[in-house]
């Protein structure tokens, strides 16, 4: 299973970015997909996650500003980030729990994409 991310970059405070992550490879289905982030000197933290059925979960720090969505047909997850602030600066990692066979699932991570918000 491979997760390929795109959409990071440099943006001014108050601006927006949209991250995308597509899962590819041989698998039965993608279960949970989400985004984590890790700022310098800090632990990796959950930003948002979405089940294949559409249930979503957000970190308190991004509620009302970020929106996670999925295209199950494309095995792709998106993160729309609005009202970005310097505190959102981090490497963002895509995560996917993937059913690879009838009785086995694997946890998978993307390579990470840098998001930098200038003040």
Image (cartoon, rainbow, N blue to C red):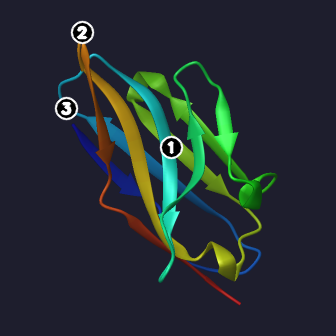
Viewer-nearest residue: 43 or 56 = 43
**Label ID, residue 34:** 1
Viewer-nearest residue: 43 or 18 = 43
Q: Which residue is mark 3?
A: 25
Q: Residues within 10 Å of mark 3 (few under 14, many from 20)?
A: few
Q: Which residue is mark 2?
A: 102
Specify whether residue 9 is in view.
Answer: no
- Figure check: 43 above or below 29: below
Q: Residues within 10 Å of mark 2 (few under 14, many from 20)?
A: few
**Residue at 48%, 64% in the rendered image:** 44
Which quadrant of the figure has residue 6?
Answer: bottom left
Task: Farthest residue to the right: give it.
Answer: 64
User: x, y (%) of residue 31?
Assistant: 43, 25
Foreground mark, 3 or 1, reads 1
Would you say 78 lies left or right of 109 here?
right
- Figure check: 115 above or below 17: below
Viewer-nearest residue: 69 or 35 = 35
**Label ID, residue 94:** none
* Quadrant location of the C terminus in the rendered image: bottom right
Which quadrant of the figure has residue 24?
Answer: top left
Which comes sooner in the sequence, label 2 or label 3? 3
* Quadrant location of the N terminus in the rendered image: top left
Viewer-nearest residue: 92 or 11 = 92
Q: CA separation, marks 2 and 3?
A: 16 Å
């Amino acid at each position: 299973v491979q997760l390929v991310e795109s959409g990071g970059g440099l943006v001014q405070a108050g601006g927006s970015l949209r991250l995308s992550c597509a899962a590819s490879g041989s698998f039965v289905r993608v279960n949970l997909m989400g985004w984590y982030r890790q700022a310098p000197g800090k632990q990796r933290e959950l930003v948002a996650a979405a089940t294949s059925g559409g249930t979503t979960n957000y970190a308190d720090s991004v509620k009302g500003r970020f929106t996670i969505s999925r295209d199950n047909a494309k095995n792709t997850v998106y993160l729309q980030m609005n009202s970005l602030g310097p505190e959102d600066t981090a490497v963002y990692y895509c995560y996917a729990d993937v059913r690879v066979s009838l009785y086995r699932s694997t946890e998978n991570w993307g390579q990470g994409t840098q998001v930098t918000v200038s003040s």
